[in-house]
Image: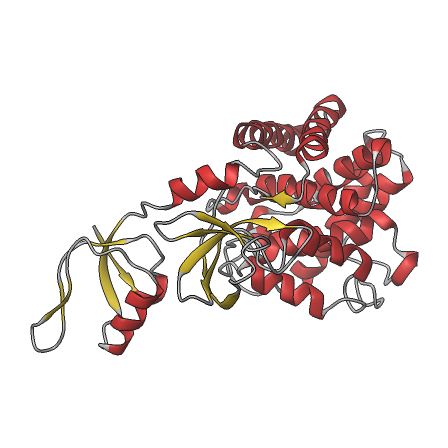
Amino acid sequence: MKIIPLNKAKYGMIIAMDIRDTTGRVILKKGTEINESIIYLLKKAGIFNIPVNSVKVVSDLKKETEKHGVISKENLDLNYNKVKDLFKNLEKDGHIDIDAVIDIASSIKDDLENNYSDKLFVPLKKLKDFDEYLYSHSLNVMIISSLLAIENKIIGDELLNISISSLLHDIGKTKVPIEIMNAPRPLTGEEMNIMRNHVLYGKELALENNIKEKNIIGGIYEHHERYDGKGYLEGKKGPYITKFGRIIAIADVYDALTSTRSYKGPWTPYKTISFILTNVEKQFDGTFAQGLINAFGIYPSGTRVQLSNGQFGTVIASNRSNKIRPLIKIDHGDVVDLSEEKSLRITKVLDYIYIE
């Protein structure tokens, strides 16, 4: 059992002991499962810290999402470990194992091409250990960038190249001191310059390791350029930024905003996609940003919603042919495909549960 703030309560947590109001009356019994209506009841009663036991529903949601997974859980975990080894060796001696890079990129590319369908769940690797963020972030950005590429009819060798470029997009951060990388505070001007130069360090590392393909280098060097020309390091604008740079910029921001960092908590995917769409033609290329919606949907997997019949549920897969009508696992009920159940619609976005 642990005591948590009410604003940290999630669907599926279990009340660990009877909860009483100020008069001593039991308003919630031990064993009650938390959902959004229970949270509302507690707020109304003026109770803001509650005793809970662990989440029990996420495993059920995982089983449902895996039916639509574009990458298997086993392959995600396997490639995460390969990415970790790749970067640890790079950090040690500055050597990029090109064979390992191609192996990882090919494995993810093949899974995406083989499993890409109309009903889609995109698993990403999210870690709480800040020291390992670079590894999970690199894997996630490769997955997202490759999806955006597929959505824009990029196939074959070019798809493999963007998988490679996005996997290596942050290799320059191996040259940035760890105390700057994980600083739990705003960076100083000097520290910010060092951090921004990671794109230059990355380009130099790639060239030193005989990676010379123009687009791969472009993705590494230009993923912090902005569509309106206000990015860095060169202030390139619009189509003057390489295609890979424009794609990886979107994937990089999506994963960064939805991740826990030393200096911030995670945004929900729903909020993150809204932010990216709001900044189309400012920070991002709208053509590639549309691919993000196609892959994740308007309501990404894990989004807690309420339906027009009053039921609560969790989105388990996007529906690429109808972005506003995803697949939803009803709480303690069946999976409903809103593209087939025309009488139902989402009326409210409530919360988010991370499903790996």
- Residue 81 lies, with reference to residue 294, above or below; the image says above
Q: Is residue 343 left or right of residue 230?
A: left
- Residue 214 lies, with reference to residue 254, above or below; the image says above
Q: Give the camera-side residue of 188 and 155.
A: 155
- Residue 108 lies, with reference to residue 36, above or below; the image says above
Q: Is residue 76 visible?
A: yes
The quarter holding residue 299 reads bottom right
Q: Position of residue 122 (x, y in %)?
A: 60, 43
Q: Position of residue 352 (x, y in %)?
A: 46, 58
Q: Residue at x 35, y 46 (%)?
A: 57
Q: Is residue 303 left or right of residue 282?
A: left
Q: Is residue 222 visible?
A: no
Colour setting: secondary structure
Q: Position of residue 331 (x, y in %)?
A: 37, 53
Q: Residue at x 14, y 60 (%)?
A: 29
Q: Is residue 95 left or right of residue 207?
A: left
Q: Residue at x 35, y 56 (%)?
A: 11
The quarter holding residue 61 reads top left
Q: Residue at x 88, y 55 (%)?
A: 241
Q: Residue furthest left?
A: 24
